[in-house]
Image: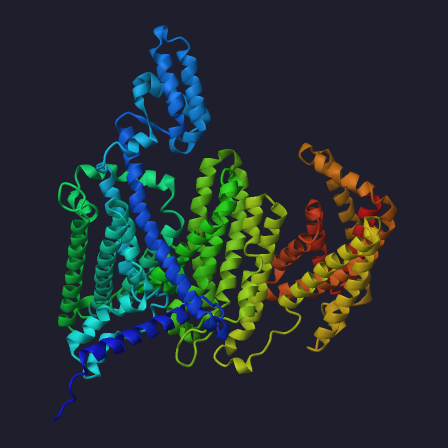
Amino acid sequence: MNLLPPTPDWRVFKLLWQAARRRSAGRRKRQREIMHRKKGKSGDSLGGLAFMFFILVMTFVHGALGWMLVSTEQTARTVAVEMSGRLVIPDYMDDALDRLAKTADSPGGNGLEDAVESFAERLDFSRSQEMGGTEKSQRQLVVDHFHQYGVAGFVTESAVVVDSSEPPTVWWPVAGFVFLWWLVMIVCQGEGLELDIQRRRHPMWEWVQSHPVRPVTAFAADLLAPMMANPVYFTAPVFWWFVLGSRFGIWPGFVGGLVVGLVFSVAASSLNKAIEISAMLRLAPRNRGALLGFVSWLGYAAMMLPLFTLNSPALKAFLVKSLAPLAGWLPLWPARALTFGWAGGAVWWQAAISGMALAGLLAAGAIALAWWAANRGLQAGGAANKPGRVRIAGAGGRSPFSRNPLQRKELLWFWRDKGAVVQAVLIPLTIAGFQVFNLRGLLNSAIGSWNGVCGAAILCGTYFLLVLGPRSLASEGGALWIATTWPQGMEDLLKAKARLWWVFSNVIVGGILLAAGVMFPRDGWRIALVAVGWYFFGHSLAEKTVTLATAPSSSGEPEPAPKGRQWAAMLGTLAFSSGVISGAWSLAVTGVVFSSLTAAAMWQNFRARLPFLFDPWSEKLPPAPTLMHAMIGIAAMVEVVALTGGIAAGVWGMEKFWLTRALAYGIVGAVAWIMMHRFLAGRGVSAESIWRWQGKKPWPETAAAWATAGVIGAALAGAAMLYLTALRHLPITSGYMGELANAAAGHDAQRIWIFIMAVGMAPFAEEYFFRGLLFRALDREWGGRRAILTSAAYFAIYHPPVSWLPVFALGICSAWSFRKSGLLGPSVLIHMIYNAIVVGLG
């Protein structure tokens, strides 16, 4: 039997490294698909620019870490001096220190106390961040320090720099920490960020099984594949240019950094692949995904953090002080050999040789690890693949999660598939943390208040759910669809998922809110109200994200949700947190109500699509009118009225504001009703079916409904007048109500137009949309009191906040009357009488 000769080694390396680059490009494309980003030619045309931008980012990251290691030396010198009893002051305080010394040396020390106070007051603001505390405590600290140590207890920053050419002992642990951070970052990078760890990985050394190549060559090429595919390795010398160049000068630092950086790139690439090879060959598939996912997450987090925080002066001081105790028992010679060399002085070639030696040891260890895993075989053995019984805490029935088989399924998924923890917890938390940091400007301005801390909690929980939902759905792959054979079905499973995600988010948000309660105990009741708002907002947001579930493609790959559904899930997500942070409580309430209604609307549509997920071409739309129809109609009507009224007021002036607004409301309301009527008629919904809940009732019942409506309208108007009177007399609201009265007094001439709009136009348009469409759809979705309360809340948020409570009551009574009488007319009458009395007498 004649076998083909082995492929030349150089050609194996070339082919496998080309495949690594193509695989890396495909992985980046796959990440965009998973994160539901835009696909198409426009993204491909910018691929080259995006790649160049990534190289620049990685260069900056290496430089930031290198500068972090170099710049902490000065911080360490400052900390070492202060540990010896001297306080480091800025250079501009040198003259003030000399004057203080002369005053202290003068006979009798006349005016010494005043000189010390003046010195401390001038030093106060320049040292505020390092000292902490209040201004008074800072001044007292400086005064006490002078009385204890005298003038000798102070030293300027420039004197600290030239104090010694050898770094202080407390710096070496920090240098080792930053170096290990950098090493972990490049080792964990691999061929690129890996989010889809559920896909089966086909490593390049599998070419050994199907191609005539030497195994040693295939494994060697695979060890260097990350270096050939990921520019993070080629930019690694930048780190060493900062480390060695700052010590030895430009050219020695450039040459030494280039050599050491490239050798470390080879070692880090080899170590990353050795870990992957060992995981592929020695671990069960579920544990394999967890390890590889954790390594990828660790590389992502270690890469992103230097972009934001590592060069913060406060963080550097914190690192030096925290790691200083380690200098007493950790060996310091490894860090010194990497930055100084092993001789008495600083020698650049000795530092370069030390770095190459350490990189060589890492590369040798990586080769040994890969060799051991390959020699052990190509299949993970042992007990890793044996089925076992998993016991979930609380299985006896005490936990609400254990009693529900769907909730138990979710917990078993987390227990058995360790990769789920990485994808469904670590990655969402990381992205949420970075998003919170991106908004740090807004948060820093409000973090000193209770609502700022609460807003940060809401923001973190919001991003956590927005990322967790799509990631969790994608992570299960085909296993998600096992529920198609369950008695409870997909809807129950997805509701169970939403509840579990909501519980996870409650842990995060609840912890921050508890911290806010400790920080601001006087505002505990306000923080509790925010927690109540999150209870409803978080649950609705979790339910919205699960409606993004899509059936896998014919190849079994998860498909991204349509853009329209993604945008619908995003509606109102930031309104709650923005309202809490800024103190705009009407916006916060609007965000909670709007998110709840959006969730109900998306579920109403999603429930109609569920039976057709695997054959979307036969999908049937839910029967009209749906919640989405009602919400779109209401939003369009309100926005167009506001727009046209504003334009008309700008053209004819504010003296005709209410005239133009009344005309706009009447015209837009009529047009909106006609358009919605024609839209619904095209779907087989007649106008009578909107104005009438069900079949005709006997005329005595109808007459009683109209009479009851008149009584309810008058009673609600009377209660509203008492409510407004109470607001005018309450100390907390009297000022605001006075401002409203003064503003209304300027529109007395237009009161007739206000009355016409409020009585002759608004009741017909609003009852048609809010009760005829919205409440009807909510009753079909939820039924009972929940539908009544939610429709009333949505009706109230479209009115001024001062009138929310009476308008909410009006919405409840109108919805109840519509449901009870079966006619929309009595609801219109309630609305007309209420507006007539409140506007005419208020």
Tell me the quadrant of the picture where the C terminus can be found: top right
Q: Residue at x 49, y 41 (%)?
A: 447
Residue at left 33%, top 32%?
Answer: 158
On screen, residue 342 versus residue 105, left or right, reads left
Residue at 68 percent across and 47 percent down: it is: 801
- Left or right of 712? Residue 203 is left
Whether residue 199 is visible to the viewer of this picture, yes or no, is no
Coordinates of residue 655 in the picture (x, y in percent): 84, 48
| Residue 440 percent location from the top left of the image | 48, 47
Residue 141: x, y in percent? 38, 23
User: Is residue 118 placed above or below 797 in the rendered structure?
Assistant: above
Q: Is residue 832 left or right of residue 773?
A: right
Q: In the rendered image, which quarter is residue 61 located in? A: bottom left
The foreground one among 262 and 658 is 262
Q: Residue pushed farthest bottom?
A: 1
Closer-to-camera residue (383/37): 37
Q: Is residue 588 above or below residue 204?
A: above
Could you say which is closer to the camera, residue 634 or residue 183?
A: 183
Q: Quadrant of the N terminus?
A: bottom left
Q: Is residue 89 above or below residue 815?
A: above
x and y percentages locating residue 763 in the rendered image: 78, 58
